[in-house]
Image (tube, rainbow, N blue to C red):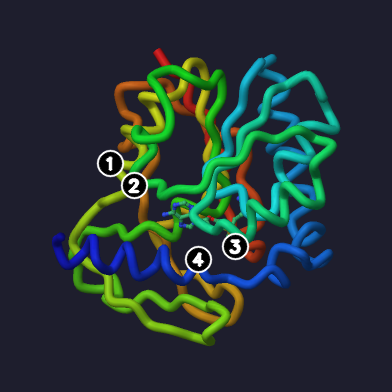
Amino acid sequence: MSKIKLRARALEEIWAEKGSETFDSRNYANLHKARRQYLAESIVNTNPTSVLEIGCFGGHNLEEIHEMNPDIKLTGFDINKDALHFLNKTKSHLKINTVCGSAYELKDHFSDKQFDVVFTSGVLIHIPCGTLDSDFPEKYTVYGDRGKQDLFLQDISLVEDVCKSILAISQNYIFHGEHHGEKFENIKGTQQRYIHNFHDLYKEESVVIEKAFNASNGFEHLIKVTCR
Ligand SMILES: C[S@@+](CC[C@H](N)C(=O)[O-])C[C@H]1O[C@@H](n2cnc3c(N)ncnc32)[C@H](O)[C@@H]1O
Protein backbone atom coordinates (compact mmCIF):
# COMPACT_ATOMS: atom_id res chain seq x y z
CA MET A 1 0.00 0.00 0.00
CA SER A 2 1.34 3.44 -0.85
CA LYS A 3 2.29 5.85 1.91
CA ILE A 4 -0.65 8.10 1.19
CA LYS A 5 -3.07 5.21 1.41
CA LEU A 6 -1.56 4.29 4.74
CA ARG A 7 -2.15 7.84 5.89
CA ALA A 8 -5.70 7.68 4.60
CA ARG A 9 -6.21 4.49 6.58
CA ALA A 10 -4.75 6.19 9.65
CA LEU A 11 -7.35 8.94 9.27
CA GLU A 12 -10.08 6.36 8.88
CA GLU A 13 -8.96 4.67 12.05
CA ILE A 14 -9.39 7.91 13.96
CA TRP A 15 -12.95 8.18 12.67
CA ALA A 16 -13.66 4.51 13.25
CA GLU A 17 -12.69 4.82 16.89
CA LYS A 18 -14.72 7.89 17.79
CA GLY A 19 -16.78 7.19 20.87
CA SER A 20 -20.54 7.23 21.02
CA GLU A 21 -20.59 10.48 23.02
CA THR A 22 -19.58 12.29 19.81
CA PHE A 23 -22.60 11.25 17.77
CA ASP A 24 -24.85 11.11 20.81
CA SER A 25 -24.35 14.72 21.68
CA ARG A 26 -27.43 16.89 21.23
CA ASN A 27 -25.12 19.69 20.47
CA TYR A 28 -23.76 17.86 17.45
CA ALA A 29 -27.23 17.19 16.08
CA ASN A 30 -28.21 20.82 16.45
CA LEU A 31 -24.87 22.32 15.60
CA HIS A 32 -25.52 22.56 11.88
CA LYS A 33 -29.30 22.39 11.99
CA ALA A 34 -29.93 25.02 9.31
CA ARG A 35 -27.42 23.40 6.98
CA ARG A 36 -28.86 19.95 7.60
CA GLN A 37 -32.34 21.20 6.82
CA TYR A 38 -31.24 22.98 3.67
CA LEU A 39 -29.37 19.90 2.50
CA ALA A 40 -32.35 17.64 3.22
CA GLU A 41 -34.72 20.01 1.45
CA SER A 42 -32.48 20.17 -1.62
CA ILE A 43 -32.33 16.38 -1.76
CA VAL A 44 -36.05 15.82 -1.17
CA ASN A 45 -36.84 18.37 -3.91
CA THR A 46 -35.29 16.02 -6.47
CA ASN A 47 -38.02 13.43 -5.67
CA PRO A 48 -35.74 10.47 -5.02
CA THR A 49 -36.97 7.02 -4.05
CA SER A 50 -33.56 5.99 -2.67
CA VAL A 51 -30.85 8.02 -0.97
CA LEU A 52 -27.41 7.06 0.34
CA GLU A 53 -25.38 9.14 2.77
CA ILE A 54 -21.67 8.36 2.84
CA GLY A 55 -20.27 9.18 6.27
CA CYS A 56 -23.68 9.38 7.96
CA PHE A 57 -22.34 9.32 11.55
CA GLY A 58 -25.34 9.25 13.93
CA GLY A 59 -27.86 9.72 11.09
CA HIS A 60 -28.79 13.34 11.75
CA ASN A 61 -29.01 14.31 8.08
CA LEU A 62 -30.96 11.17 7.19
CA GLU A 63 -33.41 11.95 9.94
CA GLU A 64 -34.07 15.38 8.44
CA ILE A 65 -34.77 13.74 5.07
CA HIS A 66 -37.11 11.22 6.67
CA GLU A 67 -39.03 14.00 8.39
CA MET A 68 -39.59 15.71 5.05
CA ASN A 69 -40.50 12.53 3.15
CA PRO A 70 -40.84 9.26 5.09
CA ASP A 71 -41.28 7.25 1.86
CA ILE A 72 -37.68 7.69 0.75
CA LYS A 73 -35.61 4.54 1.21
CA LEU A 74 -32.56 5.64 3.21
CA THR A 75 -29.13 4.02 3.49
CA GLY A 76 -26.41 5.23 5.84
CA PHE A 77 -22.80 4.25 5.23
CA ASP A 78 -19.95 4.88 7.64
CA ILE A 79 -16.56 3.57 8.72
CA ASN A 80 -17.60 3.82 12.37
CA LYS A 81 -19.65 0.82 13.41
CA ASP A 82 -20.54 2.34 16.78
CA ALA A 83 -22.07 5.32 14.99
CA LEU A 84 -24.23 2.96 12.95
CA HIS A 85 -25.12 1.03 16.08
CA PHE A 86 -26.19 4.31 17.68
CA LEU A 87 -28.20 5.18 14.58
CA ASN A 88 -29.97 1.81 14.59
CA LYS A 89 -30.67 2.04 18.30
CA THR A 90 -31.96 5.61 18.43
CA LYS A 91 -33.58 5.90 15.01
CA SER A 92 -34.93 2.39 14.39
CA HIS A 93 -38.33 3.89 13.50
CA LEU A 94 -36.73 5.52 10.43
CA LYS A 95 -35.91 2.05 9.02
CA ILE A 96 -32.55 3.19 7.70
CA ASN A 97 -30.46 0.50 6.10
CA THR A 98 -26.93 0.81 7.51
CA VAL A 99 -23.70 -0.41 5.95
CA CYS A 100 -20.29 -0.24 7.61
CA GLY A 101 -17.33 0.27 5.32
CA SER A 102 -14.75 2.55 3.81
CA ALA A 103 -15.45 5.33 1.32
CA TYR A 104 -12.47 3.98 -0.60
CA GLU A 105 -14.35 0.73 -1.23
CA LEU A 106 -17.83 1.90 -2.18
CA LYS A 107 -18.02 -0.37 -5.17
CA ASP A 108 -17.54 -3.42 -2.95
CA HIS A 109 -20.75 -2.50 -1.18
CA PHE A 110 -23.01 -0.95 -3.81
CA SER A 111 -23.91 -1.59 -7.42
CA ASP A 112 -23.91 0.78 -10.37
CA LYS A 113 -26.68 3.39 -10.29
CA GLN A 114 -28.10 1.86 -7.11
CA PHE A 115 -29.26 5.16 -5.57
CA ASP A 116 -31.22 8.07 -7.00
CA VAL A 117 -29.20 10.40 -4.80
CA VAL A 118 -25.85 9.96 -3.04
CA PHE A 119 -24.58 12.67 -0.72
CA THR A 120 -21.82 13.58 1.69
CA SER A 121 -21.61 16.29 4.29
CA GLY A 122 -18.35 17.03 6.04
CA VAL A 123 -16.77 13.77 4.91
CA LEU A 124 -14.71 14.38 1.80
CA ILE A 125 -12.81 17.08 3.65
CA HIS A 126 -11.27 14.25 5.65
CA ILE A 127 -9.88 12.55 2.59
CA PRO A 128 -6.26 13.28 1.80
CA CYS A 129 -5.94 15.74 -0.99
CA GLY A 130 -3.70 18.15 -2.64
CA THR A 131 -1.11 18.93 -5.11
CA LEU A 132 2.14 19.94 -3.61
CA ASP A 133 2.42 23.66 -3.63
CA SER A 134 4.49 25.84 -1.46
CA ASP A 135 1.84 27.19 0.88
CA PHE A 136 -0.13 24.00 1.40
CA PRO A 137 0.83 22.62 4.77
CA GLU A 138 1.98 19.07 4.79
CA LYS A 139 0.46 18.73 8.18
CA TYR A 140 -3.25 18.11 8.59
CA THR A 141 -4.60 18.42 12.08
CA VAL A 142 -7.29 16.07 13.22
CA TYR A 143 -9.13 16.33 16.48
CA GLY A 144 -10.13 12.89 17.69
CA ASP A 145 -10.91 11.23 20.96
CA ARG A 146 -7.22 10.70 21.40
CA GLY A 147 -6.70 14.44 21.25
CA LYS A 148 -5.09 16.55 18.62
CA GLN A 149 -3.12 14.60 16.05
CA ASP A 150 -1.14 15.70 13.09
CA LEU A 151 -1.13 13.55 10.01
CA PHE A 152 1.10 14.33 7.12
CA LEU A 153 -0.66 14.37 3.80
CA GLN A 154 0.62 15.48 0.47
CA ASP A 155 0.67 15.12 -3.25
CA ILE A 156 -2.29 12.93 -3.94
CA SER A 157 -5.96 13.21 -4.68
CA LEU A 158 -7.61 10.13 -3.31
CA VAL A 159 -10.82 12.10 -3.38
CA GLU A 160 -10.89 11.75 -7.17
CA ASP A 161 -11.21 7.99 -6.84
CA VAL A 162 -13.90 8.34 -4.21
CA CYS A 163 -15.89 10.77 -6.38
CA LYS A 164 -15.61 8.44 -9.38
CA SER A 165 -17.11 5.65 -7.29
CA ILE A 166 -19.85 7.96 -6.05
CA LEU A 167 -20.67 8.83 -9.65
CA ALA A 168 -20.85 5.13 -10.53
CA ILE A 169 -23.40 4.30 -7.84
CA SER A 170 -25.57 7.42 -8.37
CA GLN A 171 -28.47 7.43 -10.77
CA ASN A 172 -29.61 11.06 -10.76
CA TYR A 173 -27.91 13.47 -8.38
CA ILE A 174 -24.96 13.85 -6.04
CA PHE A 175 -24.81 16.44 -3.28
CA HIS A 176 -21.68 17.45 -1.43
CA GLY A 177 -21.89 19.75 1.56
CA GLU A 178 -18.18 20.18 1.97
CA HIS A 179 -15.81 22.94 2.76
CA HIS A 180 -13.85 24.22 -0.16
CA GLY A 181 -11.66 27.26 -0.40
CA GLU A 182 -8.43 28.27 -2.01
CA LYS A 183 -7.45 30.50 0.88
CA PHE A 184 -6.67 29.61 4.44
CA GLU A 185 -9.41 30.42 6.90
CA ASN A 186 -9.67 30.34 10.61
CA ILE A 187 -11.93 27.38 11.33
CA LYS A 188 -12.42 26.34 14.93
CA GLY A 189 -9.30 28.21 15.95
CA THR A 190 -6.86 26.84 13.38
CA GLN A 191 -5.87 27.98 9.94
CA GLN A 192 -7.33 25.48 7.51
CA ARG A 193 -7.87 25.18 3.82
CA TYR A 194 -9.68 22.49 1.87
CA ILE A 195 -8.57 22.46 -1.71
CA HIS A 196 -10.72 19.73 -3.22
CA ASN A 197 -12.22 21.37 -6.27
CA PHE A 198 -15.50 19.64 -6.99
CA HIS A 199 -16.10 21.47 -10.23
CA ASP A 200 -12.97 19.93 -11.62
CA LEU A 201 -13.69 16.55 -10.14
CA TYR A 202 -17.05 16.42 -11.90
CA LYS A 203 -16.13 18.30 -15.02
CA GLU A 204 -17.94 15.79 -17.24
CA GLU A 205 -21.17 16.40 -15.32
CA SER A 206 -23.30 19.42 -14.68
CA VAL A 207 -22.37 20.99 -11.34
CA VAL A 208 -23.99 23.91 -9.59
CA ILE A 209 -23.33 25.53 -6.27
CA GLU A 210 -26.65 25.43 -4.46
CA LYS A 211 -25.62 27.50 -1.52
CA ALA A 212 -22.56 28.85 0.20
CA PHE A 213 -22.71 28.52 3.94
CA ASN A 214 -20.87 30.52 6.49
CA ALA A 215 -17.35 29.17 6.56
CA SER A 216 -17.19 29.58 10.31
CA ASN A 217 -19.47 26.54 10.47
CA GLY A 218 -16.64 24.61 8.94
CA PHE A 219 -18.59 24.07 5.72
CA GLU A 220 -18.85 26.25 2.77
CA HIS A 221 -20.49 24.99 -0.37
CA LEU A 222 -23.38 22.73 -1.01
CA ILE A 223 -22.93 21.52 -4.54
CA LYS A 224 -25.39 19.60 -6.67
CA VAL A 225 -24.18 17.33 -9.45
CA THR A 226 -26.64 16.21 -12.11
CA CYS A 227 -25.52 12.81 -13.35
CA ARG A 228 -25.66 12.40 -17.10
C1 LIG B 1 -17.67 15.13 10.44
S1 LIG B 1 -18.54 13.61 10.40
C2 LIG B 1 -19.94 14.11 9.42
C3 LIG B 1 -21.17 13.33 9.76
C4 LIG B 1 -22.44 13.67 8.97
N1 LIG B 1 -22.25 13.53 7.56
C5 LIG B 1 -22.94 15.03 9.31
O1 LIG B 1 -23.08 15.89 8.43
O2 LIG B 1 -23.25 15.25 10.48
C6 LIG B 1 -17.59 12.59 9.26
C7 LIG B 1 -18.14 11.19 9.13
O3 LIG B 1 -17.49 10.53 8.06
C8 LIG B 1 -17.07 9.24 8.47
N2 LIG B 1 -15.89 8.90 7.69
C9 LIG B 1 -14.69 9.53 7.69
N3 LIG B 1 -13.85 8.97 6.83
C10 LIG B 1 -14.54 7.93 6.26
C11 LIG B 1 -14.21 6.97 5.29
N4 LIG B 1 -13.01 6.96 4.71
N5 LIG B 1 -15.14 6.06 4.93
C12 LIG B 1 -16.38 6.07 5.50
N6 LIG B 1 -16.75 6.95 6.43
C13 LIG B 1 -15.85 7.88 6.81
C14 LIG B 1 -16.79 9.40 9.95
O4 LIG B 1 -16.82 8.18 10.64
C15 LIG B 1 -17.91 10.34 10.36
O5 LIG B 1 -19.07 9.64 10.68
Q: Quadrant of the N terminus?
A: bottom left
- Give the residue displayed 31% in from the left and 63% down from the top: 8
Q: Earlier in the sequence, mark 1 or mark 4?
A: 4
From the Cβ of disc 4, is ligand 1 less than 8 Å away?
yes
* Distance between the alpha carbons at the discs numbered 3 and 4: 17 Å
Q: Which residue is mark 1?
A: 161
Q: CA distance from mark 2 to mark 4?
A: 14 Å
Q: Which residue is mark 4?
A: 15
Element type where label 4 sits in the image: helix
Q: Are marks 1 and 2 in contact (CB under 8 Å)?
A: yes
Q: Which mark is residue 171?
A: none
Question: What residue did someone put label 3 on?
Answer: 218
* Element type where label 1 sits in the image: helix
In the rendered structure, are the residues bearing label 3 and label 2 in contact, judged by CB atoms less than 8 Å apart? Answer: no
Which of labels 1 and 4 is toward the front? 4
**Do callouts 2 and 4 mark residues in contact (Cβ within 8 Å)?**
no
Identity, as a three-letter code, of the amino acid under mark 3: Gly
Distance (Cα) linking label 1 and label 2: 8 Å
